[in-house]
Amino acid sequence: MNTLNTTMSTSLPRATAKIVKYELRDVLRSRSLLAYTLFFLAVTDVLLRFGGGARAALSLMNVVLLLIPLVSIVFGTIYLYNAREFTELLLAQPVHRRQLFIGQYLGLALPLSAAFVVGLGIALSFHIGEDPEHLSTLLVVAASGLLLTCIFSAFAALIVARIDDKVKGIGVAIGLWLACTVVYDGLVMLGLMAFADYPLERAALGAMIANPIDLARVLILMRLDVSALMGYTGAVFEKFFGSAGGTALASLALVLWTGVPLLLGARRFQRKDF
Amino acid sequence: MIRISGLTKRFGALHVLRGLDLELGEGKVTAIVGPNGAGKTTLMKTVLGLTRSDGGEILIDGERVADDPRYRSNVGYMPQIARFPENLTAAELIAMMRDLRGNDAPVDGDLIERFKLSEHLRKPLRTLSGGTRQKVNAVLACLFRPSLLVLDEPTAGLDPVSSGILKDKIAEVRDSGRTVIVTSHVMSELDALADDIAFLVEGRVRYAGSVHDLKLATRQLSLERAIARVMVEDAVA
């Protein structure tokens, strides 16, 4: 027994990478992921072919902001719930729970990110050079999509770690997506209208940072020179996000949106009874 | 040798294990039986580290089962439900387990041959039948010659021939001096397989000892009737 233990201890730090390796193989071969790649390829291509310029970037932004959170969180929860029995089998192997949790998260977030980037990238390569002016905007859209994939996959991992009932978990996932995409904006609008007599620029700024989807949207819009349409608020936003401190704060917020759910999920996973 | 003492576990208001004491000897197959909700699954999962106990301790070969997962490099587990990543092949699954255990030693692929699994090793697991997946499950459990083998309803879903092969394998593992824990709802199966029995009732051990002694004490010929006898006596008392 002791001889085995010594050989084991050397390989334990690499366990996460090993789990990721096999999870990747599994997810990368799934048909839904291929469909997801083709979808982004087709949408990006059509938008660039028939629209182009700022309009294409705006349309792509809307698709990215709506669809990526939905697919990441729903595909993620379903995948992780279906892996429950396998998770138990893996936990009966000599691996640390934290390694397994992070391994499963990366095994989910990496292929989803890759599918999006590959789909978008192939379509972009067809049209490269056609519109160099908006290329940087499209790259910001791509970066936002990647961050949203990481964030909403982390939410999926947190939900599955906390809620044992699959149906309830998927319900919460869809509810969270709705809350971030529709409900939150509605409430912010209501709030802004109710307190329209007060200077609300800073409050609006805070509200945007507090929701990852809104934050991604603002970061993209700032690139599109449409901030002028937002009047004084737009000017405040531009000043804020144009500054180094503002960019740092926005980036920090997006990192926290990934890190905090992951940390909470890992803590729950650590103590969970399977 | 596994020594379990004073093991307690609650799930909310449900008191599943209430100070359970049990010793499992080497070179023996111990069957864990008991009515539904007696704590069989919770006991097995606690030994595997899947469930955390609220109190008490489990010692495997004198080492305490705690957060350090290394003791599990000597444990093989065959869960009741065989569900694996759909798009991996059985060969990849075996490679993954070897990788995770950092185990370069030659594995025990004996069951692959006996189950005639070689032709299925390169197919995605989602294309395999439930019975074939269960065979893969059994292969994985025995692969690393574990000193403790934990089997949860091992023959469920297996055809009679495969079930016989697995039982022969379990007997061989026992004969090589290792410890086997098994649960099953089929008492006749355990009758043929188990040396010892741990009969759980409401989170405690009602009887622990050899199957032979239990039959003698209850003057019954089969394990099923012997267990029934104990339950009837309890109901009268």
Image (cartoon, coloured by chain):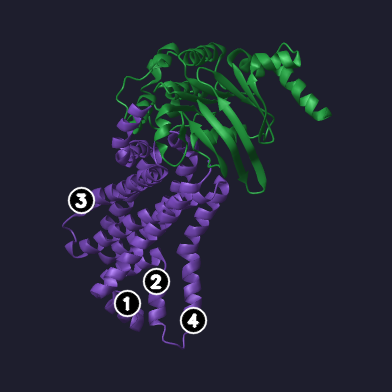
Determine the secondary structure under disc 3: helix
Which residue is identified by label 1?
A: A237
Which residue is identified by label 2?
A: A208
- Identify the subunit bearing mark 4: A
Query: Mark 2 or mark 1: which comes first in sequence?
Result: 2
Q: Position of residue A3 (x, y in %)?
A: 33, 27
Mark-to-mark CA distance, 2 and 1: 10 Å
Residue B143: assigned label: none
Colour chosen for chain A:
purple
Q: Are marks 3 and 2 in contact (CB under 8 Å)?
A: no
Q: Nearer the viewer, mark 3 or mark 2?
A: 2
Seen in the picture, residue A64 relative to B117 is either above or below; the reply is: below
Q: Let me know if marks 1 and 4 both belong to one chain.
A: yes
Q: Are marks 1 and 4 in contact (CB under 8 Å)?
A: no
Query: Mark 2 or mark 4: which comes first in sequence?
Result: 4
Q: Quadrant of residue A127?
A: bottom left
Mark-to-mark CA distance, 2 and 4: 16 Å
Which residue is identified by label 3?
A: A125
